[in-house]
Amino acid sequence: MRMPNKILAIFDFDNTLFDWVHVWYTCFDAMMSEVEKKTDLSVKELAAEIRPVHQKHGTSEYAFLLEALPSLQNHLKRGKAAEVFEDAIRAFRKARKRELQLYPTVAETLLKIKGTGARIAIYTESQSFYSFYRLKRLGLDGVVDRIYTPPDHDLPDRFLESGGRHYSRDYYQLRYSEHRHTPLGELKPNPDLLAQIIADFGVSKEEAVYTGDSRHKDVAMAKDAGVDYAWASYGEAQDTEAYEMLKMVTHWSDEDVERERRIRERDVRADVVLDKSLSQILDQYSFSEYHQ
């Protein structure tokens, strides 16, 4: 049986190309363990302060969290967070360097698709400040033709004035992949967003395929948009210790939680399932040279 041929492959990023939940938890836990050693304040005690900060900035990855927590302000009278909590920040970076890596077969699968002349796009709900770092660190700047992200939160004045904290500000910019913003406040599973991404490339829906780890968001969105899909079930987050901590300090508001509950009420069935690795997509679809 002949496989459907595609010239545009669109991927979710987090938990589809790499294990975001694991990386987030490992880094966050390493940082907060060092904060507890210095202050005797545990992450459970600080959670009531952490969550509003994450909600304010629309991300559970807010890079300037320690500066923003009221309970840490007395400690920060002695100096900048990068100095006072140097051990915590170093622990975070060490964990990130160690744990941030692509899922098995992702690199070779993307390169095979790229080698056919097809185009590759990423559509993520993680902000560009964090997504760009990961795209570069994972060696995907240039492999991915275009990445779509929501707008960033505001950066602190002192970060902008200094040009960066650990890396220069240029480090957080892409050299080869193109970037475009998704509309502020628009989230998955909005099929119009996926349709617009495909239209941006000037191809038909029949020439594109979308891959993501969430049945209720990624698969549902593709189905509603009339786009072929692959469900990366290997990346679906489980009820782990990591996920429990994420829920404790998440940037989601009560309205977001209710929205998520409603989304999950829908019975979404996936016919194309990648249950082992991304490479299985090559058994479901063929790829060929992009053209407009």
Image (spheres, rainbow, N blue to C red):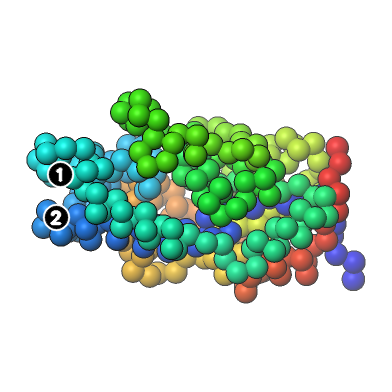
In percent of the image, x 76 and y 66: which residue is there? 282
Q: Is residue 35 above or below residue 49?
A: below
Tell me whether the residue at label 1 lies in contact with that at label 2, contact meaning CB atoms closer than 8 angstroms.
no
Q: Position of residue 207 (x, y in %)?
A: 82, 49
Relative to 236, is 220 above or below?
Answer: above
Q: Residues within 10 Å of mark 2 (few under 14, many from 20)?
A: some
Image disc number at residue 162: none
Judge whether residue 123 can be spotted in this image. Answer: yes
Residue 155 image point, x, y percent: 37, 31
**Residue at horizontal 43 percent and vertical 63 percent from the top:** 98
Q: Nearer the viewer, residue 78 or 266?
A: 78
User: Which of the numbered marks, if any, corresponds to residue 38?
Assistant: 2
The answer to whether residue 73 is seen in the rendering is no
* Residue identified by numbered label 1: 72
Residue type marked 2 = Lys
Q: Secondary structure at mark 1?
A: helix
